[in-house]
């Protein structure tokens, strides 16, 4: 496998950030169970990150809350000084009380503190892309968006994005700053954010689908994804990723894993082309 493999996924120009290869890496799964604490094998987690970059990944997604802190710290340990062209997207706005527990906090002073801490953990002067992890429903949304816009004006962040939002929320945020990316749950079997994807296409916003490789029952033996995988000499995960990459030119999947073998399998999806009939068949089944 060579660098040119990930390049097969094509590129996308993220507003205010620059060009990235469309198939990236999600660094949520390199922490302990429940996205809490350190992984059992830190060296393996760092090996996954280094291998991703070796294979041509130039867009890594993380968050202050993964661990918390663990994912950002491991990225810096494994990859700093960062290779030319590598872009790291992080997030703020979620707090952690234990494994699998997440509570949104969007008070402006908290968002600012988390940006300062992410700068420190990632060892950078400016965050490439900061995504508001969740809009805190208990805090005025304009106050949250306004603080992000201030942080961008001050040069602490390059581009700004959102996560788990509606079209109306994207439009509200766009009154404060250019929305460069949106990160919503989206995969073959969860298309609830179809309207957000279409809005992203119309407005040149990068759409980052999380949980990208989940194909649920469709991937079961004998199901449409498994059948397509057999026919193409691929795996169901690769078919799920190839379907996403074909679904839209603004699609930026960030499959996550703590395993080098799964990473290599997932990145090979960049070179997997779904023919029209296969694409239509699994699309219709979903
Ligand atoms: N914005 C948000 O609210 C939000 C929420 C969740 C995630 N995210 C981001 O999105 C990224 C991707 O989401 P995700 O990690 O939830 O979902 P995902 O990438 O669809 O799936 C990851 C899960 O699938 C397993 N896996 C990965 N590759 C595999 C393969 N080739 N074969 C079999 N199993 C495989 C992983 O386990 P192993 O580690 O064992 O491979 C892990 O349990 C995250 O890393 C994170 O950066 C964002």
Image (tube, rainbow, N blue to C red):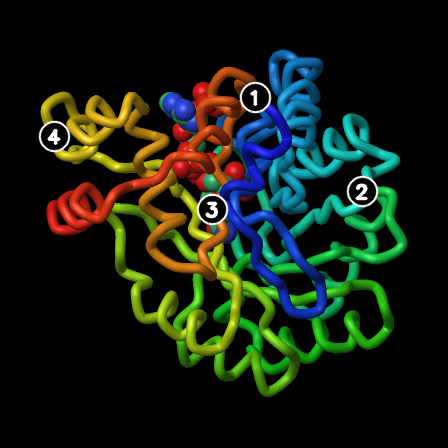
Residue marked by disc 3:
253
Distance (Cα) linking label 1 and label 4: 29 Å
Kindly identify which residue carries mark 2. 122
Q: If you read the primary sequence from the N terminus, does the residue marked by circle 3 or circle 2 appear first?
A: 2
Ranked by sequence position, the earlier of labels 1 and 2 is 1
Q: Earlier in the sequence, mark 1 or mark 4?
A: 1
Instruction: Report the residue marked by disc 1.
Output: 1
Q: Nearer the viewer, mark 3 or mark 2?
A: 3
Q: CA distance from mark 1 to mark 3?
A: 19 Å
Q: Which residue is mark 4?
A: 223
Which comes sooner in the sequence, label 3 or label 4? 4
Say whether marks 1 and 4 touch (CB < 8 Å). Answer: no
**How dense is the environment of label 3, judged by Cα within 10 Å: few (below 14), some, or many (20 and up)?**
many
**Image depth: mark 4 or mark 2 in front:** 4
In the rendered image, residue 133, in percent from the top left (x then y), is placed at: 56, 57
- Which numbered mark, 1 or 3, is in the foreground of this view? 1
Q: Disc 1 vs disc 3: Cβ atoms closer than 8 Å?
A: no
Specify whether 169 is left or right of 70. left
């Amino acid at each position: 496998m060579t660098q040119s493999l990930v390049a097969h996924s094509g590129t996308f120009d993220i507003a205010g950030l620059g060009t990235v290869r469309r198939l990236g890496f999600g660094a949520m799964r390199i922490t302990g169970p429940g996205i809490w604490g350190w992984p059992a094998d830190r060296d393996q987690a760092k090996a996954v990150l280094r291998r991703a970059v070796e294979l041509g990944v130039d867009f890594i997604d993380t968050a202050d809350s993964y661990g918390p802190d663990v994912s950002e710290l491991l990225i810096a340990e494994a990859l700093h000084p960062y290779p030319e062209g590598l872009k790291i997207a992080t997030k703020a706005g979620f707090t952690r009380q234990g494994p699998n527990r997440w509570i949104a906090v969007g008070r402006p002073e908290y968002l600012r503190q988390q940006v300062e801490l992410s700068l420190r953990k990632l060892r950078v002067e400016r965050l490439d892309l900061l995504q508001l992890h969740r809009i805190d429903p208990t805090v005025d949304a304009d106050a949250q968006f306004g603080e992000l816009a201030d942080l961008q004006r001050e040069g602490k962040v390059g581009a700004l994005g959102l996560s788990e939002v509606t079209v109306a929320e994207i439009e509200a945020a766009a009154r404060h700053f250019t929305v460069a990316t949106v990160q919503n749950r989206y995969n073959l079997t969860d298309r609830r954010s179809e309207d957000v994807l279409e809005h992203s296409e119309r407005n040149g916003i990068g759409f980052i689908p999380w949980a990208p490789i989940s194909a649920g029952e469709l991937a079961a033996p004998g199901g449409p994804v498994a059948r397509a995988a057999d026919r193409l000499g691929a795996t169901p995960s690769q078919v799920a990723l190839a379907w996403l990459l074909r679904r839209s030119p603004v699609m930026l999947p960030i499959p996550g894993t703590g395993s080098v073998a799964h990473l290599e399998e997932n990145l090979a999806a960049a070179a997997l082309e779904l023919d029209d009939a296969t694409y239509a068949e699994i699309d219709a089944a979903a």
